[in-house]
Image: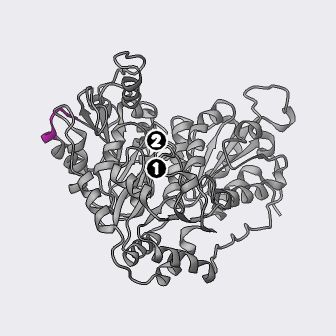
Amino acid sequence: MTKLHGGMILAQRLAMHGVARVFSVPGESFLAALDGLHDADIPNIVCRQEGGAAMMAEAHGKMTGQPGVLFVTRGPGATNASAGLHIAMHDATPMVCFVGQIPLKHRDRGVFQEVDYRAFFGPLVKWSAEVERTDRLAEYIDRAFAIAQSGRPGPVVLALPEDILSAMTDPPEMRPGARAMPSVHPDMVVPFAQMLQQAERPLIICGGSQWSDTDRKSAEALAERLRAPIGVTFRRQDYIDNDHPNYAGDFGVGMNPALGASLATSDCILLLGAELNDITTADFTLLDPAKAPAILQVHPDADAISKTYPATYAVAAPPNAILHQLVEAIAPQPDKGAAEARAAYEAWQQPQATPGDVQMEHVITWLRDNASPDTIITNGAGNYAAFLHRYYRFRQYGTQVAPTSGSMGYGLPAAVSAKLQNPQSPVICLAGDGCLQMTIQELSTARQYDADITVIVANNGRYGTIRMHQEKTYPGRVSGTDLFNPDYATLAQAYGGTGHVITSNDQFADAYTSTHSGGLHIIELKLDPKMLATTKSL
């Protein structure tokens, strides 16, 4: 049997796990892996900085449910990637990060760029390990993929010492093992159905990371049977068709006060993969753990159940393991608040005017009414995103790609990844000027791999969220929040794209329509600096 070096074994193992593409910034510490990928039918998307590469890999995992795969080099390469790994951990996204490591023979000598990755990444990811024998490489890879997808999904880091990766060994004979399929016994569904039917003000909240279009349809059918309002957690708005008559909105940052009130007054809450955390409960003010209503919790991680609020009944499984049975067990009910919650949602969607000739509420409502339902929108963090959360409507599952961790810089890398995964769908990156400039170099990656995306930049010349809090806490004492911006239209041209500068609301429609011809487009929104948020201005 012909021996193979570790890099070839690695590439073969990735193929066995069905990896569609990997994201990387190349480094001399994993040359053998690059050599293995040379002959593999797995595209390697080479990025400009490890943080952007990690966010692309995380976005891939978020969209597909399969681990996003990342390759970075040792030392600064690995530490740069930590931003994307943090997102994956908080967003429960499956991800496997391979880190080139110093030769094993030099460990603990403090050689060039040496880091103990077990210690460094231990608190940040689900599992961090270092491979010390080439003949066990396949075993470690299989375990990494299993852990990344088990229970509550998340990121895994595997450090690959240079000499271990380049050493020769026999090809592994063992194939990856099967994963256990979750199941819920019918008897466990009975108390769920009984409590929901007995409740006067039930509420369904969908969230987590394990969701599908089938789950969307089942959850909507459940809401229809129960005639109860159904909402979603922060940045999971595409989990339910926002046009559905039972959809009540999102329990996110800057949520509709009426929706928060419905949570506070509900007598039975069904959590489908969702968690009652600080965001969902407005910093734990909407519900008192000691006086919480009946809580029915469905979550893949047993450790997440009853974490802050005690569940009345719970199952440790993803939503799809119980949804169909629950729909069948619920008899049609009279209206239990769905109509009232829907009316409150539609009232919340009525635009509230903000200062300036270009208004975010106008841009987002225009997109809401005119963008195709399969348009994918990505974003990072900033007050600009609050306009998207409040005024847009997501009509198809898989069209919102955003970090629940609140990471800036995410929108652009995620848009590149989204376009590579969904080449036929329009992809919009919505970003603030501060947010975009954190990963702006990935415009080059977009052009290299023909990811035709549209970047809408909300330019107000500042870190708007921080300025909002600054004005609230220390009014009139501006410090550290103003920004200098490049000429975004010219920058787009420098990358071989097209730039559009919007100085009045009536210019946006033509600018966006022109993006349908393909290519890279940057649409700069010249916002009034006085605008801070959907309901706040200077």
Name the residue carrying label 1.
286
Toward the front, the furthest residue is: 291
Q: Nearer the viewer, mark 2 or mark 1?
A: 1
Question: Is 475 or 393 nearer to us in this picture?
Answer: 475
Residue 170 badge: none
Toward the left, the furthest residue is: 506
Question: Is 337 or 73 nearer to us in this picture?
Answer: 337
Q: Which residues are magenta?
A: 501-507
Residue type beneath disc 2: Tyr
Residue 71: % across, % down: 63, 44
Q: Is residue 92 visible?
A: no
Q: Is residue 290 above or below residue 115?
A: below
Please report the residue visible at 25 percent of the width from the left and 35 percent of the height from the top: 525
> In which quadrant will I find the N terminus?
bottom right
Residue 26: % across, % down: 61, 38
Residue 287: % across, % down: 50, 52
Q: Quadrant of residue 24?
A: top right
Please report the residue visible at 18 percent of the width from the left and 42 percent of the height from the top: 508
In the image, 167: left or right of 418? right
Residue type beneath disc 1: Leu
Residue 410 badge: 2
Does dot 2 land on a helix, a strand or a loop?
A: loop
Residue 11: % across, % down: 67, 55
- Residue 416 highlighted magenta (yes or no): no
